[in-house]
Image: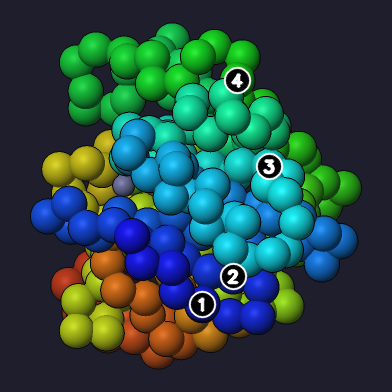
C-alpha cells in the first residue's frame, strides 16, 4: 500500500489489483482526518495505520464518492474499530443499501448495512454543505448519486470514478462499470467549472490542471458534451 502526499491537506493511499484502487486522507484544519472512500476489504488495517502515521488526530468521518464495492469494501471493518459517521449523497444510499439495483445491473446488492450511511447535508446555496474543507458536488452518471469532493484551499478535486486518465489526459470512466455514460460525460463539465490544479482518480493516475487536459475527450465526445439543440 503506498501513501503519497497530494497537497498540503491531502494524502492518497493506493493498492494495485490489476488496476489501482485508491482512497484519500484529508487533514482537517480543525483537527482530525477525513477518509474519502473505503477501498477494498483488505485495506482496512492499512487505512487505519495511515491515519496514525499522519499524526493529524483521529479519524473523524468517512465520505463516499459512491457505493460501488471497490469504494465501500473496508467500511465495515473501519467503523467497527473506529466508529465514525459515514456520508454519501442521498440519491446513492438506496443503491448501496440494496433497496435498488444499480443501473444496468440485474439485482440489488446490499453492500453496506442499512442505516450506516447518512446523506450529505444540503447547504444554504442549494448545493451540498462543505465538510472538513471539502465541497461535495453531485456528478451523476457513473453511479446515480456519484459525488466529487473539491478541496478549495488546495485546489484538488477528489474525483473517485468521475473519470479515468491516459497519458496525462482526462478520459471517460470505465464503460463496463458506468450506469449512464451520457450523463457521466456531461458530469465531466465540472472539470472546467472549478479551479482545479490536480484531479485525483480512484483507478488512474492524477491529472494536473485537468481543464487543459481534455482535448482527447472533446475530440471523441463533443456531441455528448454539447448536443445540438433539439437533438
Ligand atoms: Zn465505481
Ligand atoms: Zn471504482
* Cα separation between marks 4 and 3: 12 Å
- The residue singled out by tag 3 in the image is 61
**Which residue is pictured at 75% across the width and 56% down the height?**
57
- The residue singled out by tag 4 in the image is 116
On the question of residue 202 being in view, the answer is no
> Along the horizontal axis of the image, is 36 left or right of 33?
left
Q: Is residue 217 above or below residue 117?
A: below
Q: Is residue 29 above or below residue 84?
A: below
* Structural crowding at the residue carrying mark 4, measured as other residues with C-alpha within 10 Å and reported as few (<14), some (14–19) or many (≥20): some
Q: Which mark is residue 10?
A: 2
* Mark nearer the N terminus (2 vs 3): 2
* Mark nearer the N terminus (2 vs 1): 1
Marks 4,3: beta carbons within 8 A: no
* Cα separation between marks 1 and 4: 29 Å
* Structural crowding at the residue carrying mark 1, measured as other residues with C-alpha within 10 Å and reported as few (<14), some (14–19) or many (≥20): few
- The residue singled out by tag 1 in the image is 5
Q: 64 or 7, which is in the foreground?
A: 7
Amino acid at each position: 500500500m503506498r501513501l503519497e502526499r497530494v497537497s498540503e491537506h491531502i494524502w492518497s493511499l493506493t493498492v494495485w489489483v490489476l488496476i489501482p484502487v485508491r482512497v484519500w486522507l484529508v487533514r482537517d484544519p480543525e483537527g482530525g482526518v477525513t477518509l474519502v472512500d473505503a477501498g477494498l476489504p483488505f485495506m482496512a488495517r492499512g487505512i487505519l495505520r495511515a491515519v496514525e502515521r499522519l499524526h493529524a488526530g483521529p479519524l473523524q468521518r468517512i465520505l463516499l464518492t459512491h457505493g460501488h464495492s471497490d469504494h465501500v469494501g473496508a467500511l465495515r471493518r473501519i467503523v467497527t474499530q473506529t466508529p465514525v459517521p459515514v456520508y454519501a449523497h442521498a440519491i446513492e444510499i438506496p443503491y448501496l443499501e440494496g433497496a435498488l439495483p444499480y443501473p444496468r445491473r440485474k439485482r440489488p446488492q446490499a453492500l453496506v448495512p442499512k442505516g450506516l450511511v447518512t446523506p450529505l447535508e444540503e447547504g444554504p446555496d442549494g448545493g451540498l454543505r462543505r465538510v472538513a474543507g471539502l465541497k461535495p458536488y453531485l456528478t451523476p452518471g457513473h453511479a446515480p448519486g456519484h459525488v466529487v469532493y473539491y478541496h478549495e484551499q488546495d485546489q484538488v478535486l477528489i474525483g473517485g470514478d468521475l473519470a479515468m486518465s491516459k497519458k496525462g489526459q482526462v478520459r471517460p470512466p470505465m464503460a463496463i462499470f458506468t450506469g449512464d455514460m451520457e450523463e457521466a460525460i456531461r458530469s465531466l463539465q465540472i472539470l472546467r467549472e472549478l479551479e482545479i490544479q490536480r484531479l485525483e482518480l480512484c483507478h488512474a493516475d492524477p491529472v494536473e490542471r485537468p481543464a487543459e487536459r481534455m482535448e482527447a475527450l472533446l475530440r471523441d465526445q463533443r456531441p455528448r458534451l454539447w448536443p445540438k439543440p433539439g437533438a
